[in-house]
Image: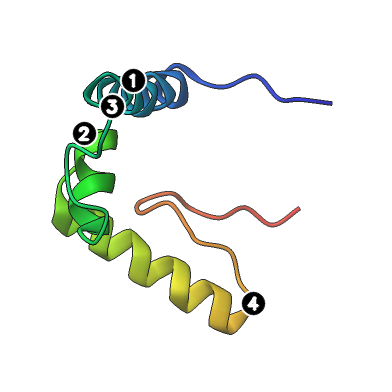
């Protein structure tokens, strides 16, 4: 069953869709495809530094078979 997206997630989807629509109208990428970090940062409205940090966290989690965590959020057992 699909889960309901929170407002922040909905806003993120809206930003990415808007960027993709602008590229569609432009009939080519607004930012070169080789600049993945910049494209993601622009699409989502977050900094390139944060994109890099999250990417490293995802890689680490994948290599250790763990989940990525939310900074400042305490994990609860059970």
In this view, which residue lies farthest toward the front? Answer: 27
Q: Position of residue 7 (x, y in %)?
A: 44, 16
Q: Secondary structure at mark 2?
A: loop
Mark seen at residue 21: 1
| Camera-nearest residue between 65 and 41 | 41
* Circle 2 residue: 45
Q: Which residue is mark 4?
A: 65
Q: Position of residue 8 (x, y in %)?
A: 40, 23
Q: Crowding at label 3, few (<14), some or many (≥20) Cα neighbours within 10 Å?
A: some
- Pick whichever, 2 or 16, lies toward us: 16
Whichever of labels 1 and 2 marks the residue nearer the N terminus, that label is 1
- Determine whether the residue tagged by mark 3 lies in a helix, strand or loop: helix
Cβ–Cβ under 8 Å for marks 1 and 3: yes
Residue 73 lies left or right of residue 39; in this view the side is right
- Mark 2 or 3: in front is 3
Q: Which numbered dot is residue 19?
A: 3
Earlier sequence position, callout 4 versus callout 3: 3
- On screen, residue 74 above or below 27: below
Please say if 62 is above or below 54. below
Instruction: Give the Cα distance between marks 2 and 4.
Output: 29 Å
Find out whether the residues at labels 2 and 4 contact each other: C-beta distance under 8 Å. no
Viewer-nearest of discs 2 and 4: 2
């Amino acid at each position: 069953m699909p889960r309901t997206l929170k407002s922040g997630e909905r806003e993120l989807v809206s930003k990415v869709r808007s960027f993709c629509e602008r590229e569609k109208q432009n009939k080519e990428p607004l930012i070169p495809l080789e600049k993945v970090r910049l494209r993601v940062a622009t699409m989502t409205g977050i900094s390139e530094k944060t994109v890099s940090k999250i990417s490293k966290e995802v890689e680490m989690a994948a290599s250790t078979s763990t989940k990525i965590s939310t900074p400042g959020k305490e994990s609860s057992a059970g």
